[in-house]
Amino acid sequence: MALEDAKTQIDLAFTREDPRGPSFELTFGGATSFLRRRYTKDLTGVDIAVTGVPFDQAVTNRPGTRLGPRAIREASSLQAPDAPYGWPFDVISERTIVDYGDVAFDYADVPTFPGLLRAHIAGILSSGAASVVLGGDHYISFPILQAYADVYGPMSLIQIDAHTDTWPDDDMSRVDHGTMFYKAVKSGIVDPATSVQIGIRTTNDDTLGVNIIDAPEFHRIGPEKAAARAREIVGERPVYLSFDIDGLDPAFAPGTGTPVWGGLSSAQAAALLRNLAGINIRGGDIVEVSPPFDTTGATAIAGAHVATEICQLLGWRMRSGD
């Protein structure tokens, strides 16, 4: 059936009638959307809205993550015909997922950006949908978490990253991709005692009480035990999952702004995410994919897989009911 469908399916980002199910459109042709989902601003009946945030004015090293959402969408076209491997269900067939497009903002007016992004995510949540965000640098998680905390109260955070991003910064107006979780904890929108950072391998003496499974420990215990520990830490609380692509070792994700050796492999990341099934996840993001440094496209491919796994985790939670 797939080959027959491929003869007629084209530009499903605009022509798709049934929002559910795989796409057999030629992977190398057609209009690009995330997993070939329909582009729409109508969130009626939508379970998951995937949205891009092409913002990288907060970087401290190599730029380029503003191009991340476009690259992740393009890479995801390779996955669109197939059910995600290793899961007992297929979220794109069971749930209505749409591509909500990108947030609009004035690139030259950085101070207004946080409020615009917070409102953008609030609009998605008010419709009853969950958001999966394609970044963009990691600062974007702060306004997103503010929107989530407005709905759910203080969030538990599962963060996969080379860096804690909790360096001190008491100026809430500063836009910095290394201090936003400091601000999130200090402002009360993230509960550190029920949050966990996985893959950390840069020095920060004060982690603000957030639980840490650093990269050496992760490699010792493996992804299954790391996931079990994370599940124990967050419990039944509402969870936001933030995956910085530099959580992967540069051998697997070179296209990022602040690469650090000794990170997770792609296989370890896949096992970690799949073993998180059952957490009370409410939304998530994949950030710091920088196409200018991604010469083979491997980083964007990894980012597309991470975003798909976040959708699967959301679908698993939705299967169990709210």
Image (tube, rainbow, N blue to C red):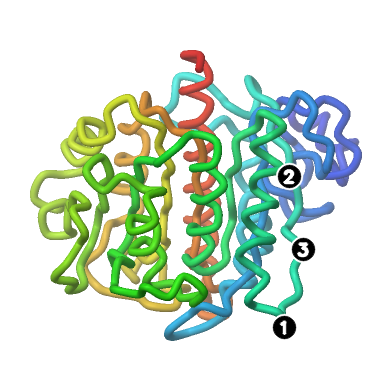
Quadrant assignment, res 232? top left
Q: Classify mark 1: residues with Cα within 10 Å, few (<14), some (14-19) or many (20+).
A: few
Marks 3 and 2: which is nearer the front?
3
For marks 1 and 3, give the CA distance.
12 Å
Q: Is residue 48 above or below residue 254?
A: above
The x and y percentages for residue 62 are 47, 84
Q: Determine which quarter of the picture holds residue 136.
A: bottom right
Mark 3 surroundings: few (<14), some (14-19) or many (≥20) residues within 10 A: few
Q: Which residue is at a point 35% across and 41% down the rendered structure image? A: 156
Report which residue position mark 3 lands on.
104
Q: Residues within 10 Å of mark 2 (few under 14, many from 20)?
A: many
Residue 289 percent location from the top left of the image = 51, 67
Residue under numbered circle 2: 99
The local secondary structure at tag 2 comes to strand
Q: Which amino acid lies under the numbered mark 3 shown in the image of this protein? A: Ala
In the rendered image, the quadrant that contains the N terminus is top right
Q: Earlier in the sequence, mark 2 or mark 1?
A: 2
Inspect the image, locate mark 2, and give the three-letter code of the amino acid beneath it: Asp
Tell me which residue sits at (19%, 71%) in the image: 204
How far apart marks 2 and 1 lie (CA) works out to 26 Å
**Helix, strand or loop for disc 3:** loop
Contact (Cβ within 8 Å) of mark 1 with mark 3: no
Q: What x and y, as percent, mark residue 131?
A: 60, 42
For the residues bearing labels 3 and 2, Cβ distance under 8 angstroms? no
Q: Residue at x 88, y 28 (%)?
A: 17
In the picture, the disc for residue 108 is 1
Spatial CA span between label 3 and label 2: 15 Å
Q: Determine whether 59 is above or below 158 in the image.
A: below
